[in-house]
C-alpha cells in the first residue's frame, strides 16, 4: 500500500518546483527526485524514490509537441476537434535497477531523452536514495511487494504525460526478475513492452542447482531471515566497469550517508528462489518482451582480462533458457563482448545494445520509428565515454569504490 499520493491533478502547464513533491536530486545535478512512503510487511514503513531529468514543462497528452499546430490547422480548415489529426502518443521509459544498486546511469537517461522519450527511474525500497539508517539494505522477503512502487511510478508517469502515454519498462539483473513478476501479475495499463538487460531469471548454473540447494537454504533460515550467507565476491564485476580498474566509468559507488553494507541474506535469497520458481513454471506476460544478454559468461575464481567482455555475474545460457517462459512473444538478443550491465560495456558492444533496443522499442513498444539522424547522433553520444553525461557528475570516487573486501561493491558477484 502506498501511503502518500502521487502528483497533483490539474493544470501542469507550468511546473512549480516542489509543489507536486519533486525536488532537485542531491546525487545527480540536473535531475530531480520524488519520495513516496510505502507500508511494509517487514521492518518499518519504507520509502521509494523516483528520479527523472529536470523539466520546465511536462509533456502531457493534451500539451504534447505539435498539438498547437494541429489546433491551428483545424481552425484554418474549419474541421471540428473530432476530425483533427491526433498527435503521436507520448513515449516514456520506466527503469528498475538491480541488486546493491541505485539509479546513476545518466547516459541511459540522456540517450532516451535525446530521442524524445521521457525517462523515469526508481530507487526501490531499501536501496540507494530510499535506504534509511535503520533499515537492512536491499532486504525483502517477497519480490511481489515491489509492485507497490512500480504501480506508483507508472501512475506518476501517466499523471505527467497523459492517458495516451506508452511506457516501456526497462530493467536490469534482479530488477528484471522483479519486473517480470509485476508484468505477469498486474498486466499494467500503459506499459506496452518489457526490455530486460541481463535479468536474473535463473540461478547461476541451472534450475537443478536451485532445487538441490533449497534444503540448505531452509536450514539457514532457521537462524532467521537476516542471517548472512557466506557467499564471497572477488570483485571482478567492479573491474569490468570502473575506470580506475580498467573499465570506462567513473561514478560514486555509494554517495549516501552512512556505511550500510549490502550482503546476501537467507530470507532475501529465499524470495529470489521463489520468484525464479515462478519463472520456471511459466508466466503469461501479455506484451512483447526483449531479453538481452552478453554472448558468454565467465564466472571463475581467478581474474582474466577476457572478463572485461563477458558477463561475470550471471549465467547467460540459463537466462536465455528461462526467458522463453516469460510470455508468448519473447525476443532474445546476444550482444557480443557485452558485460553484465550491457549499457556499461565497452563502446562497440554498448552501441550495439542501444541500437538494438531502440529499434526493437520502435517496433514493439511504440510502433513509431525514430528519426535516422537523431538516432545516429544519440548512438554516437552514448558510445563516447568521454561526453559529460556518461558518468555521474557527483564526481569520481575511486577510493570509495575500491571497498571490495567489505561488501560495498556496486553490485555483488551473485546478481
Image (tube, rainbow, N blue to C red):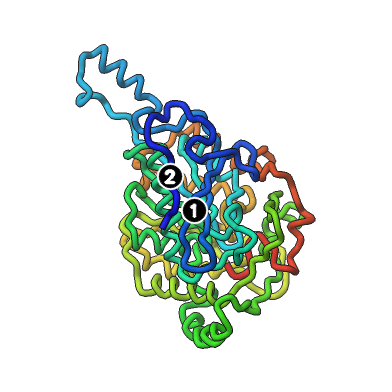
Mark 1 element type? strand
Question: Residue 360 placed where, x, y %?
Answer: 41, 48
Q: For label 1, count other residues whose C-alpha is less than 10 Å away and answer few (under 14), some (14-19) or many (20+).
A: some
Residue 337 shows in this picture: no
Among the two numbered marks 1 and 2 on one chain, the one whose residue lies closer to the N terminus: 2
Q: Nearer the viewer, residue 10 or 175?
A: 10
Q: What residue is drawn where x is 54% and y is 82%?
A: 221
Vertical arrangement, residue 7 with respect to residue 72, above or below:
below
402 sits to left or right of 324: right
Residue 299 shows in this picture: yes
- The residue that disc 1 covers is 37
Question: Residue 68 placed where, x, y %?
Answer: 35, 20
- The residue that disc 2 covers is 6
Mark 1–mark 2 distance (CA, rounded to whole Å) = 10 Å
Q: Quadrant of the C terminus?
A: bottom right
Image quadrant of residue 288?
A: bottom left
Question: Residue 18 placed where, x, y %?
Answer: 53, 36
Q: Nearer the viewer, residue 61 or 330?
A: 61
Amino acid at each position: 500500500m502506498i501511503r502518500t499520493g502521487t502528483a497533483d491533478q490539474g493544470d501542469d502547464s507550468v511546473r512549480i518546483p516542489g509543489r507536486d513533491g519533486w525536488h532537485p536530486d542531491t546525487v545527480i545535478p540536473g535531475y530531480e527526485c520524488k519520495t513516496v512512503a510505502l507500508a511494509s510487511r517487514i521492518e518499518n514503513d519504507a520509502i521509494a524514490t523516483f528520479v527523472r531529468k529536470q523539466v520546465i514543462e511536462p509533456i502531457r497528452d493534451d500539451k504534447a509537441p505539435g498539438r498547437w499546430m494541429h489546433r491551428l490547422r483545424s481552425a484554418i480548415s474549419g474541421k471540428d476537434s473530432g476530425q483533427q489529426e491526433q498527435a503521436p502518443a507520448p513515449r516514456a521509459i520506466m527503469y528498475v535497477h538491480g541488486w546493491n544498486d541505485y539509479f546513476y546511469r545518466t547516459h541511459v537517461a540522456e540517450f532516451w531523452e535525446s530521442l524524445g522519450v521521457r525517462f523515469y527511474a526508481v530507487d526501490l525500497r531499501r536501496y540507494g536514495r530510499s535506504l534509511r539508517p535503520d533499515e537492512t539494505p536491499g532486504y525483502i522477503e517477497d519480490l511481489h511487494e515491489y509492485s507497490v512502487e512500480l504501480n506508483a511510478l507508472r501512475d506518476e508517469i501517466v499523471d505527467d504525460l497523459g492517458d495516451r502515454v506508452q511506457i516501456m519498462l526497462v530493467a536490469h539483473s534482479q530488477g528484471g526478475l522483479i519486473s517480470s513478476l509485476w508484468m505477469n501479475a498486474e498486466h499494467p495499463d500503459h506499459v506496452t513492452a518489457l526490455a530486460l538487460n541481463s535479468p536474473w531469471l535463473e540461478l547461476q548454473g541451472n534450475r537443478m542447482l536451485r532445487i538441490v540447494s533449497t534444503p540448505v537454504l531452509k536450514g539457514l533460515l532457521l537462524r532467521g531471515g537476516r542471517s548472512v550467507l557466506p557467499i564471497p565476491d572477488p570483485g571482478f564485476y567492479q573491474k569490468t566497469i570502473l575506470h580506475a580498474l580498467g573499465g570506462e566509468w567513473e561514478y560514486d559507488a555509494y554517495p549516501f550517508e552512512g556505511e550500510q553494507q549490502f550482503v546476501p541474506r537467507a530470507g532475501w535469497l529465499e524470495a529470489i528462489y521463489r520468484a525464479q520458481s515462478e519463472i520456471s513454471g511459466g508466466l503469461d506476460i501479455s506484451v512483447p518482451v526483449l531479453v538481452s544478454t552478453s554472448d558468454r559468461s565467465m564466472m571463475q575464481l581467478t581474474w582474466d582480462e577476457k572478463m572485461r567482455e563477458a558477463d561475470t555475474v550471471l549465467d547467460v545460457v540459463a537466462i536465455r533458457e528461462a526467458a522463453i517462459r516469460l510470455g508468448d512473444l519473447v525476443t532474445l538478443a546476444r550482444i557480443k563482448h557485452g558485460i553484465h550491465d550491457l549499457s556499461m560495456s565497452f563502446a562497440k558492444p554498448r552501441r550495439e545494445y542501444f541500437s538494438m533496443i531502440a529499434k526493437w522499442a520502435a517496433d514493439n513498444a511504440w510502433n513509431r520509428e525514430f528519426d535516422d539522424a537523431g538516432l545516429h547522433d544519440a548512438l554516437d553520444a552514448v558510445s563516447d565515454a568521454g561526453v559529460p553525461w556518461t558518468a555521474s557528475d557527483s564526481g569520481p570516487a575511486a577510493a570509495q569504490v575500491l571497498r571490495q573486501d567489505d561488501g560495498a561493491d556496486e553490485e555483488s558477484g551473485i546478481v
